[in-house]
Amino acid sequence: MDLVNAPEHSLRDEPNLALLAKGREQPDPRRVLADRVDQLYDQLWIGILGAFLLGGIATYELWEPRYRGLVLFWWGLVSLVTIASSWLLVSYRRSRDKLAEADQWLRWLGLSALAIGTVWGFAGAVFFPAHTDEQQVFLAFLLAGVVAGGIPVYSGSWPIYALYAASALLPFAYVLATFGNRLFAELAALVPVFYAVNVAIAYRLTKVFSTGYRLRYAFRELTDDYRALNKRLGDQLQELQEASRQVEESGRKLTLFADRAPIAVIEIEPDGRIQRINPAAEVLFGYAPAELVGKAVETLVAAAARAEFTQQWRPVVESGTPLFAQLIRNLRRDGLEIVCEWTLTPLVNSEGRVLSVVAQGRDMSAQLEAERMKKEFTSTLSHELRTPLTSIIGSLQLVNSGTMGTLDEDVLELTVIAERNGQRLLDLINDLLDFEKIRSGKFDVVPEVIEIDELLRETLLLNRAFAERYKVQLVSSGSLPQLRIRADRKRLLQVLTNLISNAAKFSPQGQAVEVVVEMLRDRVRVKVKDRGPGIPDDFHAKIFTRFSQADSAIARQKGGTGLGLAICKHLMELMNGKIEFEDRPGGGSIFWIELPRMEPCQTPEEG
């Protein structure tokens, strides 16, 4: 009989267990088998002790001189089986891998049960016919008790019990059937019934135990899961508490920031109603919080600017798009209109829905008015200075050229200095006017087709006198190619003049400023090379910003407004070109400009 693959109780047959283990995997059959084997060995010592004690009682009762040898032989079998079963129990207890060897231990237990049952079957078959009626009754009662007592010992595996009971009852039933006594024959017929009833009880108990082990396994798994779940819930609760604490702390910080912020902060609902304002907003608009909370934000917008504000507000609440540095005309409580710069930041949840909008603004009216006045002052002052300066410089040029007669050397030196400084002042005024035009967006360029070689010759000619003043030569390296570009002639001449004059001012005496033209694939690059002190590394990032000059003795000595290169950069961008610089090998700098090149067959309109 296969002791390992014997029928087991299915988990599906137990509704309660199915409900408990619903949604879980079936318990591992090997673990259930191992638990059953462990139970069988836990109860094996009862069977060993019972067999030994009952064997001793039977030996005492059957001890007669004529059967003494046979009784001693049987007692020896009982002792041998007891010792073997005890050794099996000790070996199992010492085993380290009971799970992997569960089926093997079950087989050994089956052999032990078979041996014990066979010993008792031997007693029934041998001693029953040879003894008195009282002893026969004793043996029959003893065998029935041994068979019934095996149920709790081997109930963990009904096949083992069936093997044990069969080995004990079958020899006895055979003796009863062949004894020749009608009563004993009838008793022999009842033995199989007694055997079947006991096996059925053992079978049912085995099913109950198997279900119990499955339940225990399921409950153990559920307990582990509940423990892990409780731990996760505890961790998540701590994280939630920490997150709640951080949110509260952030909320307090934001509230403190909003209340102490020097700029106006307004929180607005997506439908445009004001939710809260900070003290700076109260001061700016002259309203108390109770007067604004719940009202439409358009209350703070000038009537003429509300349509424009609505267009700007719609994408903020519909798509969560922030709005940065937007000038909006606002209306104070006293009716005064002010211009404020606002930044609108929508607060969006994880689903992409706008919860509210935080508006941060500051009054720009005074600053805008100051800038307007500064522009008017600069423009007026520049125009008022440029007209007399032009006349002064023209007069000094006439005097210095000798038209008005020969002057003493000392007087001529003073008039030359006056002319140069007047020219520097005029250049400063022109740079300021140009830069203000660029900033206000009123600076326009007029593109036209230009022959690059003619423009460079003109530039070199116009700046030769300036270079000679610093004892520097202007040269063109190589032949000037006949290429056409489309640009504003006057402004391009201004850019090249600025680069060449800077190179001449900072070049050592006796050196040459080289002008080189390079043809790229679809562009023209003009380089101005000098042998000056170069550009300091810490000044590279600021060289094209306004009012920037390298902090060196040479720069201070040569003078300048610090606007020239900034104006050149803006002019080149307006003409779709670019301006850059690089260090020259051996010392000095190379400034270069690039412009799109026109093809020979390209018409001016196409350019």
Image (cartoon, helix red, strand yellow):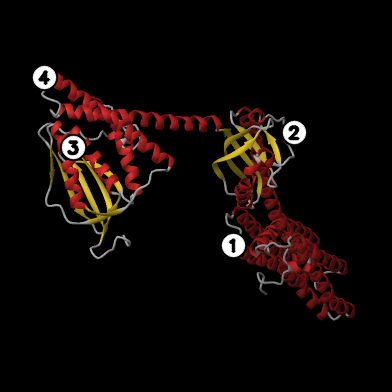
Q: Which of marks 4 and 2 is nearer the N terminus?
A: 2
> In the shown orientation, is residue 327 left or right of residue 420?
right
Numbered disc in front, either 1 or 2: 2
Looking at the rendered image, the disc whose residue lies closer to the viewer, 4 or 3, is 4
Which amino acid, mark 1?
Glu
* Residue 101: numbered disc: 1
Q: Residues within 10 Å of mark 4 (few under 14, many from 20)?
A: few
Residue at 24% across, 29% down:
393
Q: Which of 584 and 529 is in front in this view?
A: 529
Q: Say whether marks 4 and 3 touch (CB < 8 Å).
A: no
Q: Looking at numbered disc 2 in the image, what kind of residue is underneath it?
A: Glu
Can residue 436 be seen at all in this image of the molecule?
A: yes
Mark 3–mark 2 Cα distance, whole angstroms, equals 67 Å
Residue 370: x, y in percent? 49, 29
The mark nearer the N terminus, 1 or 4, is: 1
Which residue is disc 4 drawn over? 408
User: Looking at the image, is mark 1 or mark 2 earlier in the sequence?
Assistant: 1
Question: What kind of residue is marked 3?
Answer: Gly
Query: Of 423 and 70, which appears nearest the observer?
Result: 423
Q: In the rendering, which numbered label is found on residue 291?
A: 2
Task: Tell me, for residue 390, which label it has, or none.
Answer: none
- Rounded to the nearest angstrom, the CA distance separating label 4 from label 3 is 39 Å
Marks 1/4 in contact by CB < 8 Å: the verdict is: no
Residue 396 image offset from top left, x and y in percent: 20, 27
Question: Residue reaching furthest front?
Answer: 404
Instruction: Tell whether label 2 touches label 4 (CB within 8 Å).
Output: no
Q: Marks 1 and 3, how far apart in space?
A: 89 Å
